[in-house]
Amino acid sequence: MRKWIGATAAMGLVALGGLPASTASAASAASTTSTASTASAAEPAGPKVIRVGATQAMDSMNPFLAVRLVSSSIHRWMYGFLTVPDAKTLKPSPDLAESWTTSPDGLTWTFKLRTAKWSDGQPVTADDAAWTFTKMMTDDGAKTANGPAVENFADVTAAGQDLTIKLKAPQASMLDNPVPIMPKHVWEKIGDVSKYEADDFPAVTSGPYLAVEQKKDQYVKLKANPNYWRGAPKIDELQVIFYDNPAAAIVGLKKGDIDLIGRLAPPDFEALKGDPNIVQWNTEGRRASYLQINYGATTSDNKPIGDGHPALKDQRVRLALHYAIDKQKLVDEAQNGLAVPADGSIIPPMYKDFFWSASGDQKVSHDVTKANQILDDAGYKKGADGIRTMPDGSHKLRFRFSIHTDTPSEDKLAEYLTGWFKEIGIALTTKRLESSKFTEETGTTALFDIAISGWSVNPDPEEVLATHLCSRRPTASGQGGGTESFYCDPQYEALYQQQQKELDRPKRGRAHQADGAAPLHRRAGDRPLLPERPGGLPQGPDRQHHAHP
């Protein structure tokens, strides 16, 4: 028996990369990747079962609510979409929509849905798609996972197998829509979608697999969908096994409890070298990790929320934090060299059309002297204890750093940041949170100062850019959301709308590089980013939507 094992470098502030076998997602920006699979020619014939290890549990089986990477990956196996990226070119290709046309002004799109069936035998129709999009347009609770995907929709109608979407303005990302199409005849019976966990099995799906069993935080079992329009999958059953931490997952792999695993920290990845039962692989990924900063959170109706430290509202403080961080040292020592510093946009370098790299005076490099000078000039004086105080004397610069309890590598990151920030008169205390609590505090209630976060970017970067729209902030009741840092800036909104209307891809890419990326990098909390490196799986951060298989 030979195992194929996947390891991923997982350090915050570093890009993780690769295709996580555990989540079937094209992965991240700063890590190493390896996959493990058990197979033996001597095994008797029977159902083909693949057991996938994951170090992040699903937040919800409900696609309207799920925001974690592992969740959206499993939903990719379960549901169909209008289009999906081609496996080789990454360009949009037909899925449930077999063809489409666009009006000359780019405002009306008509998709012709193919003849397909739901797993319960009911036909898939354009009415299913129209109901899915309309639900998101009219119900705040249904916007949690993919709200921006329908924000520009003016009207959605269905006639037979034709789905017509009318837009408010041209939209370059129309063929990269990340919304799974849901069965209307099942979901229209649900009352409050924001409270529905979708734990009725077997699930009714149109994708290659249907979920048949789940034990929360332990596993999800999926079986091949015999009604799948491409034909029944060759693998009869997929089992996604959730582990509390990478070390436990590695033990499970070596024992043969799982066949594939990703999200391994660099030391774990390197420790597996030479094992004859393990095959490791490393390939260019699409993830970046970064710091999420609470610079003054507000709800979507602009009401203050949370308890972020007031000093973080000062761009000079955020800039000083950036200068204090030695990203190259994180790469070398925390990532064992299996990453690259993120001296550029949140869009990873593998997407050459859209990646922006900082240079000259826009590049922020490690410079403790400069960081201290910025704070001195801004009036943040050090006390006898070495900790600075705000110019008005109201608050000491003591910040919380929120990390995940199930990601040991983030503890190491916290140690580095604590030391560097101490050099510039800022105290940092680590706040460890279980994943669901982490998501709540950093994306809904804003009960944080600084947090580790990250994103795996799709071939069209519209979705990750949309996480910084004002509309992504949660409502006063805590619904919707999906924000990063509760960011809201008029200049960014204008740039976002400008790039969305540019249907010429090369021109749109140049706009990202010249305008869109720079403000995001400089102003969205002035976060130190570490972009993708060739290779690695997603590590640590809770949020990332839509990893494409």
Image (cartoon, rainbow, N blue to C red):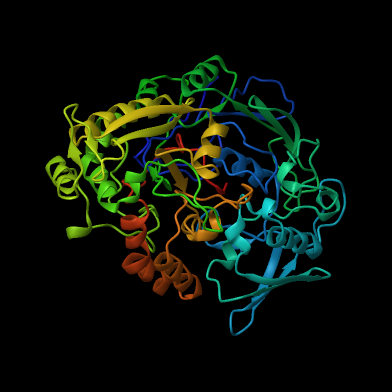
Which residue: 42% across, 69% down?
Answer: 495
Q: 62 and 243: which one is in front?
A: 62
Can residue 208 be seen here? The reply is no
Left or right of 224? Residue 347 is left
Left or right of 27? Residue 9 is left
Q: In which quadrant is the N terminus drawn? A: top right
Which residue: 15% across, 50% down?
Answer: 377
Residue 277: x and y in percent read 47, 20
Can residue 393 be seen here? The reply is yes
Q: 547 and 372: which one is in front?
A: 372
Residue lying farthest bottom? 104
Which residue: 54% across, 42% down?
Answer: 445
Left or right of 529? Residue 180 is right
Q: Is residue 141 above or below residue 381?
A: below
Number of residue marks: 0
Image quarter of residue 472: bottom right
Residue 482: x and y in percent read 55, 49
Which residue: 68% across, 46% down?
Answer: 63
Residue 520: x and y in percent read 37, 58
Residue 38: x and y in percent read 57, 24
Image quarter of residue 115: bottom right
Q: Is residue 45 above or below residue 323?
A: above
